[in-house]
Image (cartoon, grey):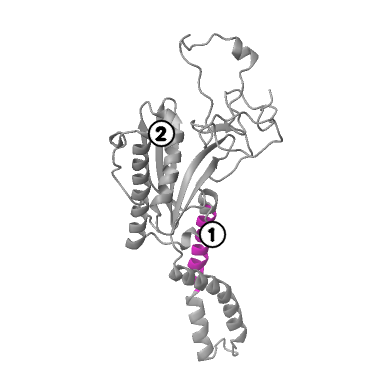
Amino acid sequence: MVCPKCGVPDPGPGPFCMSCGFKLPASPVTAALPSIRPPSAPAPAAPLSPSGQAASAPAAGPAQPIASPAVGQMGSTGTVPVSIWGPFAGYGTRGRHVSWLINDQGELADALRDAATARFERREIPRATIQRVTLLRQGILVDSRPYFLIRSGLATAGLYIARFGQDLYVSQVTYFKGPISNVRVLLVVAMVLFALIYPAVLNDSANQIGFNLFGGMSGSMGGLLALVCCLGPIYLLDYLALGLLALFSAYKWLTEKDLLAALRVPPNEFDTDDIVALEKSVEQTVRESLDVVGIEQRLMPQAAEYGLRRRLI
């Protein structure tokens, strides 16, 4: 079978294309199976376009990058080359992650996303940029899901609204990318300079010291050599610290796509206020959107905690 939307020759065994998320027509084998829907049940409606009219299936074309999953459903899977980063790599440290499952309201997922889009435009969160993007979880299998990304300063809130069977699933996650500390930058620069300069100073001092026939040395040069030798343990500790810093930076690059993570500091009181305000704004936007689509707000109880987890460094 060839996907009628993106032209992939093997779209996968499921009802949706593994590459673009398009709902595939029933194969001859599937069509021959008896339907489990009662005879009186109506046929499922075609997906609606943003204008409210039924969307027609596009003609086959060249292969396209992985797009948003099927309308109203959670992400579709396929196969892509292995990637070392997760869907939120580069956005910082993950903080609060809360979710809600609202029974028997899955058919309103599209309407709730549209209502949230309109409400975000009216709310005007300070210094915030709001985007509707498709995030990918890549590996042996890929999962693509549509998210709202609300970025304000150093904080990013991700909002995910999707249909989960007959239910409605809402998820909210917060990420924070801490500011780079000037003190940490100066400390690292000093450590690097000491690691580069100390061997040259040691060699130069040893070459300039004169020995007399009895194995003695001048007082000034002897004191300099003693000082340089005493700095030897500090030099070894400096090299060890730089090695650990390099390993930690490599680990953060592989896991969070942040090579400068060791130079960042945890959020202070001002940052925490900005994070909490952003989280509350996003959550309140969803609640107001529930009223627009006719869902009671009590079905989405208040989340208990706000803010990020504590960091050791």
- Frontmost residue, 34 versus 240: 34
Name above or below for residue 197 compared with residue 99: below
Which quarter of the picture shows residue 114?
top left
Mark 1 to mark 2: distance in Å?
41 Å
Q: Which residue is mark 1?
A: 246
Q: Amino acid at mark 2?
A: Tyr
Lower sequence index among marks 1 and 2: 2
Q: Residue at x 57, y 86 (%)?
A: 215
> SS of the residue at dot 2?
strand
Name above or below for residue 15 compared with residue 188: above
- Please state the horizontal and vertical placement of residue 84, each as a whole percent of the image: 57, 45
The label nearer to you, 1 versus 2, is 2
- Please state the horizontal and vertical placement of residue 129, each as a whole percent of the image: 47, 54
Magenta segment boundaries in residue numbering: 232-251
Q: Which residue is mark 2?
A: 169
Q: In the image, is 312 to the left or to the right of 139? A: left
Q: Residue at x 61, y 86 (%)?
A: 208
